[in-house]
Amino acid sequence: MGAYYIQTDVLLKLGRNEGYAEMMEKLVPTMASHGWKLIMALQPMVGDFRKLTHLWEVDAFDDIRRGLEACAADPEVQAILAPMPDLLETEALTVMVKTPYAP
């Protein structure tokens, strides 16, 4: 099987976009060291500006677990994620694979 993709759908608390962006600038390279490559980060041009979507790529299914365990146990990652309760309303994670017709 090829790569796996993790889609995260985030709903920020009102007015927390800048703080969230600052946190993510630190988190992205750290997650890369655990096998998660950020492919795309999207925000609305029109609509609810609190909604964000991220698409991460991992080479192996086990990399998903490694990244999530780092979020739960690695002191460096926990320090980066410390502001999260003040920034997020919700976050949903979906693990996906490419469709047969995807390029």
Image: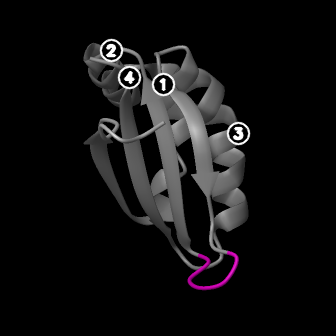
- Residue that badge 1 annotates: 36
The residue mark sitting in front, 3 or 2, is 2
User: Most prominent secondary structure in the magenta stretch?
Assistant: loop
Q: Look at the picture and state if 77 lies above or below 39.
A: above
Which of marks 2 and 4 precedes in the sequence? Answer: 4
The three-letter code of the residue at mark 1 reads Trp
Task: Determine the secondary structure under disc 4.
Answer: loop
Task: Tell me the element at label 2.
Answer: loop
> Alpha-carbon distance for marks 4 and 1?
11 Å
Residue drawn at (48%, 25%), measured in percent from left and top? 36
As drawn, the label of residue 3 is 4
Closer to the N terminus: mark 2 or mark 1? 1
* Magenta highlight range: 45-49
Q: Nearer the viewer, mark 1 or mark 3?
A: 1
**Image: 2 above or below 95:** above
The quarter of the picture where the N terminus appears is top left
Q: Which dot, 4 or 2, sits closer to the camera?
A: 4
The first of marks 1 and 3 along the sequence is: 3
Rendered location of residue 60, percent (x, y): 33, 14
Q: Please state which amino acid type lies under the numbered disc 2.
A: Ala
Label 1 Cα neighbours within 10 Å, binned few <14 / some 14-19 / many ≥20 = many
Mark 3 Cα shell of 10 Å, populated few (<14), some (14-19), many (≥20): few
Q: Amino acid at mark 3?
A: Glu
